[in-house]
Image (spheres, rainbow, N blue to C red):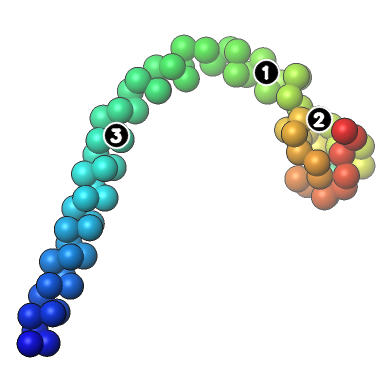
Amino acid sequence: MEWGLFVLAVLLVAALQFAVWRRLQSEDAGTPESGLAESASPADVASSQSNASVLLCPACGAENDADYRFCRECVAQLQP
Ligand SMILES: [Zn+2]
C-alpha cells in the first residue's frame, strides 16, 4: 500500500522532470532564431545603451538605465 504510493510519487516526479527537460530541450532548439535576431543588431543595442537609455546618477555619477528611479549604486533618487 505505502510502497505503491511511494512508487507512484517517484514516477510522477520523474515524469515532471522529463517534461521540464523536454521543454528546456525545445527552448534550446528555438534559441538560434532569437540569437540571430539579437546578433543582427548589436550596434543598435550598444548605441542605445551608451547614451539614449543611460541616466547618470547626480550623487555618485554611476550609469543607470533611464527607467530606473533610484541609482543602482548609491540608491539616490534619479532625475525624472
Ligand atoms: Zn548613485
In this view, 46 is above or below 9: above
Residue 24 vs residue 51: left or right? left
Q: Mark 2 — residue?
A: 55
Amino acid type at mark 2:
Leu
The residue sitting at 88% across, 44% down in the picture is 77
Quarter for ligand 1? Answer: top right
Work out how far the residue at label 1 is from the one at label 2, CA to CA, in angstroms.
12 Å
Q: Is mark 2 on a helix, strand or loop?
A: strand
Q: Is residue 60 visible?
A: no
Kindly indicate whether the residue at mark 1 contacts the one at mark 3 (C-beta within 8 angstroms): no
Work out how far the residue at label 3 is from the one at label 2, CA to CA, in angstroms.
34 Å
Q: Mark 3 — residue?
A: 28
- Which of the 4 image quadrants contains residue 45? top right
Kindly indicate whether the residue at mark 2 contacts the one at mark 3 (C-beta within 8 angstroms): no
Q: In which quarter of the image is the C terminus?
A: top right
Q: Is mark 3 on a helix, strand or loop?
A: helix
Q: Mark 1 — residue?
A: 48
